[in-house]
Image (tube, grey):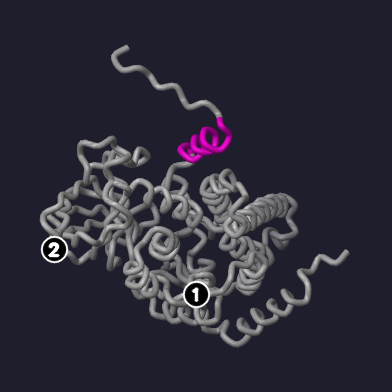
Amino acid sequence: MDLSFGPEYESFRAEVQQFIADHGNKSPRQGGARNKDAITWQKLLIENGYAARTIPREYGGYGAEPDIIKSRIIAEEFSKNQINTGLGGQGISMLTPVLLEMGSEEQKQQFIKPTIEGDMVWCQGYSEPGAGSDLASLSTKAELDGDEWVVNGQKIWTSTAQLADWIFCLVRTEPDAPKHQGISFLLFRMDTPGIEIRPLVDMTGEANFNEVFFTDVRVPKHQIVGQRGQGWQVANAILGHERGSLAPPDAAQTRLNGVAKLMNSETMSGEKLIDNSVFKDRLMKLQGRVLAMRCNDMRLLSARINKGQDAKLAGMIVKLQGTELRHELEALAIDVMGEIGLSYGSDNPYLRGNGSWQHTYMYYLGLIIGGGTSQIQKNIISERGLGMPKEPKIEQGG
């Protein structure tokens, strides 16, 4: 039985392999906002069609037609060779797709190219102290004063706010409208007068989150996506992209390959961990789950191309399954390392992978909560995906 993709796709695979052979040494070990090597690498990937592949050329992308198999081949070859797949983050993974769908032509021209190239960093102004899982209860307000919005309020859990150039922010512009209908979606610079950022240190020991305060922040009237009061529709589109970007299966495959490599080098009582039946069993179970997530990802890619397909439920499971899978992958690596796996920080000469296993273990424990807790995700899947009845609400004053 021939399970190859055929001559056209095998030729494309050879092109990807040649790119990796020629340029793989330039792949940065770490990415992230403001990393010059990562930004240079991102631009090289876009130029060759390995990042921003289907974004139109007029907005800075490569401009290729969507192709599920080619996307899979790129992911497979980059993962197999431990090659950095390029920049992500809220601007690239969340805002850019929504601007392509709902933004004005001026907004597309202004924001997409510098965003996907890593020159413009974004943060997301959604959650508030009193509006987390019930996001539509947000109270940060924006009042129109001539040609400017005047924003007052507070956001919390704002990732990368301390690094961001711009923020996409949900604000209440219609205080008398029902809560889902009185919200607008604004874009504004983070150096605008009246913005205060306070870092929040999380369980990794770093300030990955922030709380942000707005005091009479003036935003030009035209910096709104969609119409006034239509922010909830934009927000839902963003949330769909967010939940899919928090734990992509290609990254899980790369980490799985890393765990297998670690098990081939670490020993217990003179035996390689890859030959230990208990650890091998755990690895094989995770391999099966990663494969399932990759197949689910292909289903989602197919649905984007073939608009008639219903992949709503397939999209709902990604955040729940993906974050819990990544946490378990990192946990296996820590167990494989034995007592060394208990180390944390960068000053231990015995650390494997510069301590990335321990750091990512803690990070994904947080992401199981962030972006919509697992409990919230299960409610979404059961009610919206499977049509199960909603939880009963307790009557007030009963």
- Which label is found at residue 29? 1
Exactly how many numbered labels are in the figure?
2
Point out the residue furthest to the right here.
1
* Visible residue check, residue 200: no
Q: Position of residue 23 (x, y in %)?
A: 56, 85
The label number, if any, that marks residue 193 in the structure image: 2
Q: Quadrant of residue 301?
A: bottom right
Asked if residue 255 can be seen in this view, the reply is yes
| Magenta part of the chain | 375-387
Position above or below: 344 against 181: below
The kind of secondary structure element at disc 2 is loop
Horizontal arrangement in the rendering, residue 177 relative to residue 238 (left or right): left
Residue at the spot 38% in from the left edge and 64% down from the top edge: 91
Q: Observer-nearest residue: 203 or 265? A: 203
Q: Which amino acid lies under the numbered mark 1 shown in the image of this protein?
A: Arg
Front of the two marks 1 and 2: 2
Disc with the residue nearer the chain's start (1 vs 2): 1
Q: Nearer the viewer, residue 80 or 319?
A: 319
Q: Which element carries disc 1, helix, strand or loop? A: loop
Magenta region includes residue 377: yes
Residue at left offset 38%, top offset 70%? 112
Question: x, y (%) of residue 246?
Answer: 48, 55
Do the numbered discs 1 and 2 sit on residues whose CB atoms are within 8 Å? no
Residue projecting furthest to the top? 398
Q: Amino acid at mark 2?
A: Pro
As for residue 297 lying within the magenta part, the answer is: no
- Mark 1 Cα shell of 10 Å, populated few (<14), some (14-19), many (≥20): few
Q: Is residue 306 left or right of residue 352?
A: right
Residue 137 appears at what percent x and percent y? 29, 38
